[in-house]
Amino acid sequence: MTALEAVAVHLPHHTVPIEAVGERLGLTPRQLRLFRRFHGLDQLRLDPDGKLPDLLGATVDALTELRGRERDVRFVIHARSMPVAVPYPLNPLHDLLHRYGLGHAQAFTVTHHACAVGLLAVDLAGRLLAADPDPRALALVLTGEKTFTKDAQVVPETGIFAEGAAACLVSADGEHDRVLSYAVRQRPEFDGRLAEDQDLLLCYQREYPDVMVEAIEAALDQAGLDLSDLALLLPHNVNQASWRTIARRIGFPIGKVVLDNVTSVGHSFAADGLINLHTATTRGLLDRGDRYLVAAAGIGATFSAMVVEH
């Protein structure tokens, strides 16, 4: 059974109010009021001077559980929301391998699930490790991206991106955070430029809660659990309003949805689930044996949910 052996997080020290980002991107005062008052956004963690290798390297530095186990890592997977992150022929992922003694590992990127791709990477890591005969074999999942264009920083009427990052060691079997289920619902009719197609944006906003709920319920069914069995729901940090709507629709206590990082960190592409898990564990919100659900949605559109036992 796929297990999350360890999780580490890197949050840039530079904190920026959403108004400063909005001014740079040309957002209107009305748009900024929507983000702050309705969606509950406040500030973003950004590293204006750092590049993608700095971001990913900082997560590996923070993953102290990797030390001494580098030779056990068979796969290094960058879960990336954006299909293109650096110009050819640059390859920061492969550069990272040699810096951290991981040159022997197979390294690649998974994408096309947008901000839900972090859960895909964890599931894929578990599947690959299940076929490895060595019980000590590990996979390293990396999440984190730069907000290098306007499209990479704003989801119209929905959220603004930050640059938080996370790393996760995955094993095929273990006692830490065992994955009980993984469900995906994809709606390709929403693949398009929401910023330029108002009808598509409105349709996506209307359907979003229902499809996210469908993915959550599918993951619970696979795990043989009910909502009442969950200690926490770990969302992606796109905004607070959408998760309040979803929690109300499914009858889940909003106090058990970890929303703190929406205001203090911002939406960090595919890293949100791991960032929120790190928050939950460091704050002692999970006891051994607790079940929790990680949920994420990605433009395109992919809706994913994963049930895990702490």
Image: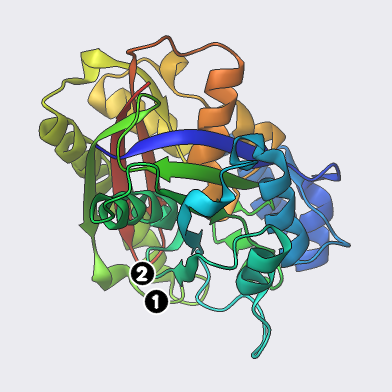
Numbered tag placed on residue 200 in the rendering: 2
Q: Quadrant of the N terminus?
A: top left
**Residue 255 x, y percent position in the rendering:** 46, 14
State the residue at coordinates (51%, 64%).
Answer: 80
Q: Is residue 26 above or below residue 135?
A: below
In front of the other: 210 or 125: 125
Type of amino acid under label 1: Gly
**Residue 144 x, y percent position in the rendering:** 61, 56
Tell me whether the residue at label 2 lies in contact with that at label 1, contact meaning CB atoms closer than 8 angstroms. Answer: yes
The residue wearing badge 1 is: 192
Q: How far apart are the alpha carbons under marks 2 and 1?
A: 8 Å
Q: Quadrant of the C terminus?
A: top left
Q: Earlier in the sequence, mark 2 or mark 1?
A: 1
Q: Assign a secondary structure to mark 2.
A: helix
Task: Residue 69: name its quadrant.
Answer: top right
Q: Assign a secondary structure to mark 1.
A: loop
Left or right, 123 with reference to 139:
left
Q: In the image, which is nearer the foreground, mark 2 or mark 1?
A: 1
Left or right, 122 with reference to 109:
left
Left or right, 6 with reference to 120:
right
**Residue 171 x, y percent position in the rendering:** 38, 42
State the residue at coordinates (64%, 79%).
Answer: 91
Please indicate, yes or no, whether residue 27 appears anywhere in the rendered image. no
Type of amino acid under label 2: Leu
In front of the other: 266 or 198: 266
Give the number of callouts. Answer: 2
Please indicate, yes or no, whether residue 63 appears anywhere in the rendered image. yes
In front of the other: 168 or 221: 168
State the residue at coordinates (65%, 41%).
Answer: 67
